[in-house]
């Protein structure tokens, strides 16, 4: 069993209110020096067998269709070493 | 400016319906061989200056207070190389 | 076509860091008088035909299985008038 | 103390992969007759005192700034009767 990780973040030009809320809240709790925060999604997929090139491009396809909206979000897919 | 990444996932023993929905949907779209999916949150923090040990433990504190609920979620904090 | 709305909120005794971040950020942006914020999920389901009692209890079942984690979340299901 | 509810949904023309995943998963679990699902956010705000017109437009402002991205999301704000 291998682990594939998909990170999905709003594109940099798309305003992220959730991240902004966190960034604004941090100084009030005494946490300074954090200039900006962006909040996105992380998916961990357990893939059966080895992650062949074929399987990897499968996961890329699934990410484009079901895990992200490519119009407003960027994503990265990577195999996580065990 | 340095980048710190915080990953927040539900603890393994806590059912994750969102991840389950994705896992159930994948075969219908022709994506087989994915045994399980977990959905979590990813935060990207832009930190001013260098990420000293002090600053790093600052971000850990902020994560425990404002980015995650340690009762139901696990998190990792790491500095991302530029 | 009828519309069913499912609201899913963390149980009151479960800390909600996202809502807390928003509550902490509001005064900094000049919004006072908001004592607490909780963030949850809202699902809008388009149901074919009429929402019979049977169909409604179907949606309740789907909510328990796929839209929420009843251990940590509460939910409500209601038909929205057109 | 009054309760104000803010619902935030992606605009209809913006693809919602999370909702799509749920819609695709439902039939596999035996739930038929649900044509489409959209997933959004629900915020519950506890407001001190009465929700005057002033306070209400305050919450509207906060929603536009901190709870939603008006470019990609629609929102509604309403006072919930106790």
Image (spheres, coloured by chain):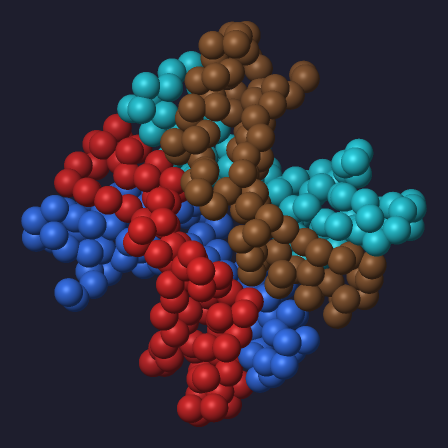
Chain colours: A blue, B red, C brown, D cyan
* C45, above or below C82, in the image: below
Q: Is residue B37 left or right of residue C75?
A: left
- Identify the residue at the far front of this view: C13
Q: Is residue A56 left or right of residue A44?
A: left
Residue B42 appears anywhere in the view: no
* Position of residue C63 measured from the top left corner of the image (x, y, whole percent): 46, 29
* Position of residue C26 measured from the top left corner of the image (x, y, whole percent): 73, 63
Residue B26 appears anywhere in the view: yes
- Residue at x 44% of width, y 60% of height: B71
* Position of residue B39 measured from the top left corner of the image (x, y, whole percent): 37, 50
- Residue at x 65% of width, y 40% of height: D7
Q: Is residue A60 left or right of residue A7?
A: left
- Residue at x 48% of width, y 23% of height: C60
Q: Nearer the viewer, residue B48 or B7?
A: B7
* A28, above or below B56, in the image: above
How many labels sit on residues? 0
Q: Is residue D14 left or right of residue B33?
A: right
* Position of residue A19 measured from the top left corner of the image (x, y, whole percent): 56, 63
- Residue at x 52% of width, y 21% of height: C46
Displayed quadrant of residue C77: top right
Q: Work out which quarter of the rendered image holds the C terminus of chain B and state it.
A: bottom left
Q: Nearer the viewer, residue C49 or C75?
A: C75
* D34, above or below D81, in the image: above
């Amino acid at each position: 069993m291998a682990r594939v990780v998909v990170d999905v973040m709003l594109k940099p030009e798309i305003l992220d209110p959730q991240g902004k809320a966190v960034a604004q809240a941090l100084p009030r709790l005494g946490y300074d020096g954090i200039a900006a925060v962006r909040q996105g999604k992380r998916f961990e997929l357990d893939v059966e067998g080895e992650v062949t090139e074929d399987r990897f491009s499968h996961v890329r396809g699934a990410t484009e269709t079901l895990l992200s909206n490519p119009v407003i979000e960027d994503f990265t897919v990577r195999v996580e070493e065990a």
